[in-house]
Amino acid sequence: MQFELTQEFLESIIQAIEKEDDAFLKSTFDDFYSEDIIPIFWELDNLQRRYILNLLDVESVARVISNLDETTRHELFTLFTPKEIARFISELYSDDAADILNTLPVKGREEIIAHIEDTETASHINELLRYDDDCAGGLMAKELVKANINWNVKQTIAEIRRQAENVEKLYTIFVVDDLDVLLGRVSLKKIITSKDTTNISQIYEPDIVRVETFMESQEVGEIMQKYDLESVPVINVQGKLVGRITIDDAIDVIKEQAVEDMQAMAGISTPVEEDDTVWKLSKARLPWLIIGMFGGLTGAAFMGLFEQNLVLIPAMAFFIPLITATGGNVGVQSSSLIVQSLANSDGIEESNWKRLKRVLLVAVFNAFIICTIVFIFVLLIGHPIKLATVVSSALFFVVLLASVMGTITPLILDKVGINPALASGPFITTANDLLGLAVYFGMASLLYQI
Amino acid sequence: MQFELTQEFLESIIQAIEKEDDAFLKSTFDDFYSEDIIPIFWELDNLQRRYILNLLDVESVARVISNLDETTRHELFTLFTPKEIARFISELYSDDAADILNTLPVKGREEIIAHIEDTETASHINELLRYDDDCAGGLMAKELVKANINWNVKQTIAEIRRQAENVEKLYTIFVVDDLDVLLGRVSLKKIITSKDTTNISQIYEPDIVRVETFMESQEVGEIMQKYDLESVPVINVQGKLVGRITIDDAIDVIKEQAVEDMQAMAGISTPVEEDDTVWKLSKARLPWLIIGMFGGLTGAAFMGLFEQNLVLIPAMAFFIPLITATGGNVGVQSSSLIVQSLANSDGIEESNWKRLKRVLLVAVFNAFIICTIVFIFVLLIGHPIKLATVVSSALFFVVLLASVMGTITPLILDKVGINPALASGPFITTANDLLGLAVYFGMASLLYQI
């Protein structure tokens, strides 16, 4: 069902462009969803892209432009005049139009807006540009259909016919008073299934979920998910209806958050994609590598203090990777569980003490199993019982400490407003490496009385 | 805007239940979204929950039950007869009803279905129970509104009034032929804004995106996202319309996938939540800890072969954590980028060679910076130039190897059908620990000619 771009198909497109076979191209792209043109555009050069766009109607061009990634879109814009771009932009929902304009330099942006013919569209876009990207105001679109509480069904249907021209995705009619204050909503289904003379006030649903312009995007996404909303009205501080957010925008927010968390966990400091430039990728990856490196160097300096141990018992070195890796693994497991539970927190938060108790129980159980295996194994490969005791008892405490560290670090980060997913990555690994070494060498000094 | 449960509020509820203050409870929960009752239920015991449910209308009870987590729901079900449960279940969408029944033992499930009075509802549920959880058939609901291609708008509106009773979320009317084969759709907006005598064939939209019953849930989620669909029709092999999937179900799939990937990355082998039982948590965490442990023990056995190096140059041990940690960090970064790009793959896949080339360039650049710092630092803390050379050159190759490993492992896993996120976690860390040790000790043997 889903379109898959093949090399053969791509070549047929490129050949048709070269031969200026407009008939073939037009008939091909007529059947296409604009979303499926995007992967083709990635493989074409700018002039080939322009050739195709010239064959499409303005609505399709607008949709392609809105679905393109930022880089490709900027490349493409260099081939069009501000007036042409304004024509495409006018076809979009106001939120998508504002998002695109937001990525342009101020001068270019204003030139384009100046060319938008419909003054209402221009003023909508200007209003949306005022809001930050990551709040409800930045997510909302101005296009919506509203009905006055004093109307009847017939008046409302007339109004829908008038207003709905610009609103393709019509899920619900918002109900407002004379001052535009949001009162509730009425579903299209209810409108269709009611008599013409029924008053909106009799069939509308009050007490609906709404969000305010300044609410964070992430919270909007959570609310829409929690209450299963396909669209949510946005109000300003006076309670007036100023826009609506549809579920597709909320999904984008949810997806972005997931990618951000995953990258934070993997120690990538700014969101990047695999096919970004070498320079961008290096820059995003270096910070945590350097922090990890200084962790490793600190570990080296720390072990320097215990050189005597290593000289007397060189076999101690063999188990350093076991100690550090186990600490790292346990820490990452613990913190990812906390990160996940912070993201889905509802209800009364569990006391941190109760959390820690469960974490410690799990840690003791797992540590016991691992340490038993390790103890037996170390003896089996011919090391003295004293070393087996040092290794396995150090490991026991490392598992416990790493569990506690992995649990409290994200809780603390969350309290001070830093993304706790950061904690689940290289930070926990580095901290636990150092902690593990300290426990291991401390334990050895104690048991060997060096 | 979002409801937050406080301790005070909870106590007022518990007191009201004890004093049997039905008036207070009723007036409180009348204003409540059923989603907000869930966190309260978590804090109550089973009899308190039942007390509240008795005060709610059957529709609200159904919604609460459908939103509850599995464990709490099963506890609650012990207080109701199959007949009562059947009444609640009948109020739900068929997909939610089937999901709930799917979690019950076969006997209990059949008793409940036998008590469902409406035979159409029962047969819908029975049909849905046949499908696997993770395919389109398992996601879809039977409730939908369809119109015959030969009808006009007036007939369609009459049919909407008749069919729409059970369909609260009505986004679109599906258009079918006499044999129920899906032809397209027509939006409610179009129906409202068209004349009564207009034929559906004139205003319907053909060529719409559809999915087949056996398509994987994850793919359904991707398609709905890609094409910004709020609902998608499901067809069987004959092309007949058998159900629809709404965007809220697709969001659940997207979220579950994100959590699953995150846990795989963190080395948790089965999906768990932070507040699961100690036993469940331990079981989910042990497998990767044990694999990591055997990795560490293999490393120890491997280093045993190089004991001579450690006896001659005890300071070599100091840098073991630096080598293993850097390899781990680089590996996790590389693989998480690949995992993310595999999840969003569109267009023609980049050749693996092109991928590797970029990965290596990034690696060389980052390795160069890190190795220079390490070289200087090792000299600064008073080690001989030979050791500094061994450490920093080993580190250089470790970064390169870990990048390559981190890139190809998820690609291979993906090819053989294993979730590549698994590769980004403990597997890469463990493998890179061993690889790093081999390079480090190999390099030392070479330069010291031991």
Image: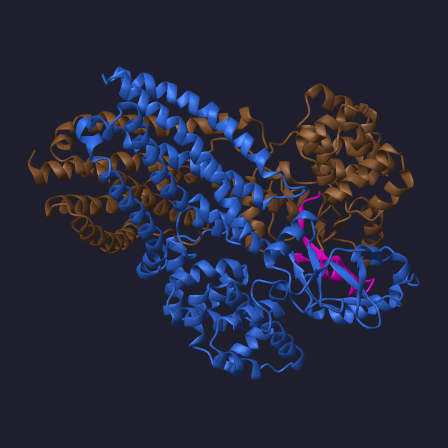
Chain colours: A brown, B blue
Q: Is residue B329 visible?
A: yes
Return the x and y of residue A25 as percentages of the image width and height: 86, 41
Membership of B79 in magenta stretch: no
Q: Quadrant of residue B384?
A: top left
Return the x and y of residue A296 as percentages of the image width and height: 30, 29
Return the x and y of residue A188 as percentages of the image width and height: 75, 58
Image: B8 above or below B402 = below
Image: B154 above or below A169 = below
Q: Quadrant of residue B218?
A: bottom right
- The residue at the far front in this view is B449
Q: Residue at x 78, y 37 (%)?
A: A62
**Which sits in the foreground, A413 or A380?**
A380
Image: B315 above or below B184 = above
Q: In the image, A106: left or right of A9?
A: left
For the C terminus of chain B, the image quarter is top left
Instruction: Give the extent of the magenta segment.
Output: A180-207
Return the x and y of residue A197 as percentages of the image width and height: 82, 62
Membership of A199 in magenta stretch: yes
Q: In the image, A39: left or right of B195?
A: left
Q: Is residue A231 visible?
A: no
